[in-house]
Image (cartoon, rainbow, N blue to C red):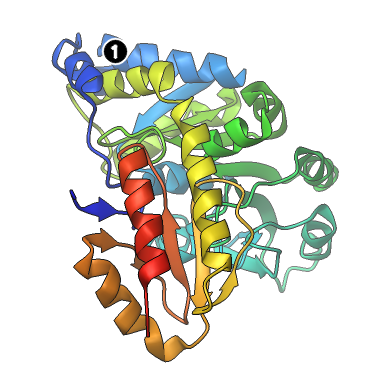
Amino acid sequence: MKEIDLRSDTVTRPTKGMLQAIMSAEVGDDVYKEDPTINKLEKKLADMFGKDEALFFPTGSMANQAAIKLHTQPGEQLICDKWAHVYNYEGGGVSFNSGVSCKLVDGDRGMITAAQVEENINPPDFYHSPLTTLVCLENTTNKGGGACYDLEEIKKIRQVCNTHKLGLHLDGARLFNALVKKNEDPKDYGKLFDTISVCLSKGLGTPMGSVLIGDKRLMKNAIRVRKVLGGGMRQVGFMAAAGIYALDNHLEQLAKDNQRASEIAEVLKTMNYIGKVEPVETNIVIFYLEKAENEDEFMKQLSENNIRISNMGQGKLRIVTHLDYSEEMHNHFIDTLRQVTF
């Protein structure tokens, strides 16, 4: 059996069709905005979400960091969940790149409510505290196990942002998993958020790339910020071709990824060595062993069966299904889970 790597959906490799698209891409110099395939991808995503503009970035972290820079000034503060990717997994970039602090909210599986946003806004006339200017949401949530926001709650958060004149950014690294799961229209998100970052190298399976999508008033400076962050690229249309191919051919696969994750969760719940399985909505399964001291042995038995998953620390184990995880692998993995012994 080929190695089964379920650490993340970032481990995928291009399909044959994607490789053909990459090899035949028409390219130019994107720093001059002369790469036709990049321009095509950016327009495709801007239109998909009903926004004015889009800009390709090499990574999701850079796209998020650029968005925060566009929304804020040094010394200000953004509101996000305590598990947010922009706080936990972007190298302290919020403070380093933008000079901004984070007000962390104790949400539910990485999701915060409109009421929580309201109560965490600093009074704008109280000059002792940072000025709150931005709210960052994440959908689906990474550390929250792929949880999906209720669109109605996002609408309420938008209303709070409007009332207090706050920007609203979406870290949509796995937004397509949520859209497929809940059968939602990307344009509904475009109406609610000022900026949205979407990742092409997770569920959609491209080698690299994220795209920042937003309103013209913010995006007019996005290319300058990308340059400052070191994100200017040349003939990157090869990667844009992979993104276009993925958007045209891989969205349906996300439903399979979501379903297989649910099936894994159901099997885990029946195992006596499992202590807890978090609710599963999309392609991430987070679970805990009954006895934390068995973690090393558990990971060893998986490794002996050519299976890799993530240990996130504090007893939290993670499985992420993806494009390269086949039905044959799925059956082998489930059989292995049933055979684990301590």
The kind of residue on which mark 1 rests is Thr
Q: Nearer the viewer, residue 173 or 245?
A: 245
Using the image, determine if residue 303 lies above or below residue 261: below
Question: Is 189 left, or right, of 257 in this rendering?
Answer: right
Q: Where is residue 24 drawn, in percent x and y?
A: 16, 10
The answer to whether 69 appears left or right of 130 in the picture is left
Q: Across the whole image, how many numbered discs are drawn on residues?
A: 1
Residue 282 coordinates in the image, percent (x, y): 56, 46
Q: Nearer the viewer, residue 340 or 248?
A: 340
Q: Which residue is mark 1?
A: 37
The quadrant holding residue 80 is: bottom right
Q: Where's residue 246, x and y in %? A: 37, 23
Q: Is residue 228 visible?
A: yes
Q: Residue furthest bottom?
A: 293
The residue at 47%/24% (across/down) is 54
The foreground one among 68 and 242 is 242
Residue visible at 37% across and 69% down?
A: 339
Q: Quadrant of residue 317?
A: bottom left
Mark 1 Cα within 10 Å, few/some/many (few <14, many 20+)?
many
Image-quadrant location for residue 224: top left
- Can you name the residue that lies furthest to the left here? 23
The residue depicted at 49 percent of the width and 20 percent of the height is 45
Q: What residue sits 48% from the left and 74% below the top?
A: 316
Judge by depth and name the residue closer to the eye, 191 or 15.
15
Residue 60 horizontal/vertical position (percent): 40, 44
